[in-house]
Image (spheres, rainbow, N blue to C red):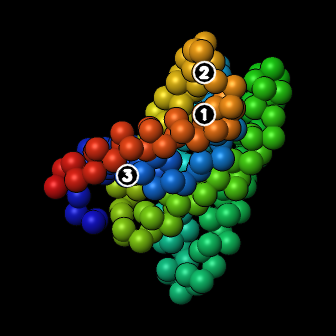
Amino acid sequence: MSGESLPYIFLNAAIINNFVLALFLGICPILGVSAKLSTAFPMGVATAFVMLIASVSAWLINLVLGYFDLMFLSLIAYIAVIASAVQLVEMTVKKFSPALYQALGIFLPLITSNCAILGVALFQTSYEFDFLQSLFYSLGAGAGFILAIVLMAGLRERIDLADVPSIARGAAMSLMLAGVLSLAFMGFAGLGG
């Protein structure tokens, strides 16, 4: 897979194999923070930023650990980098937008445990991407995450205004919307060959 073009790598990570809607990674923030567009988009941007840092750092970590034949430490190193990047994002949001920090609540530090971020680092390692490919892969994954959470938030805001039976409101409706979005994204499977 390392011979793919950069636009295809971006498109593959963003749409064809979207981490949330095709690979079912990172579902927790999609269901937890997507009630409003005002919180969903910043959460998507924060997660995309951590994906970018994790992917670039994973490429560097693989280079260093491979040189010293210490690849068994790669998973621990990825987790340390992800946790550090999330702390940076959390401190930045708290400093510059306390209202957004309050609105995101526990989901902001929980970016650390978002399996989509660790998935970006592990997948790009297994695909043996070079630095540019890793960069495009993480940008595509981040764009795909933002797309998924914004689509979900838009649908949830529209559904709140609709006459939906009370038994289908809340978590049940969120899961049904996620399923419908996932089915829609399955239509992109096979795109590009």
Quarter of the picture containing the N terminus is: bottom left
Q: Are marks 2 and 1 in contact (CB under 8 Å)?
A: yes
**Callout 2: 10 Å neighbours few (<14), some, many (20+)?**
few
Q: Are marks 2 and 3 in contact (CB under 8 Å)?
A: no
Identify the residue at horizontal 55%, vertical 77% (top origin): 65
Residue topped by disc 3: 17
SS for tag 3? loop
Mark 2 or 1, closer to the camera: 2
State the separation of the CA atoms marked 2 and 3: 31 Å
Residue topped by disc 1: 173
State the separation of the CA atoms marked 3 and 1: 24 Å
Residue topped by disc 2: 164
Q: How many numbered markers are drawn?
A: 3
Which quarter of the picture shows residue 93?
top right
- The amino acid at mark 3 is Asn
Mark 2 or 3, closer to the camera: 2
Closer to us: 62 or 22: 22
Identify the residue at horizontal 47%, vertical 51% (top origin): 19
Residue 146 drawn above or below residue 140: above
Mark with earlier residue (2, 1): 2
Residue 106 drawn above or below residue 39: below
Q: Residue 32: percent from the left, percent from the top?
A: 69, 38
Mark with earlier residue (2, 3): 3
Mark with earlier residue (3, 1): 3
- The amino acid at mark 1 is Met
Which quarter of the picture shows residue 54?
bottom right
Residue 170 drawn above or below residue 10: above
SS for tag 1? helix
Identify the residue at horizontal 51%, vertical 54% (top origin): 24
Q: Residue 61: percent from the left, percent from the top?
A: 55, 68
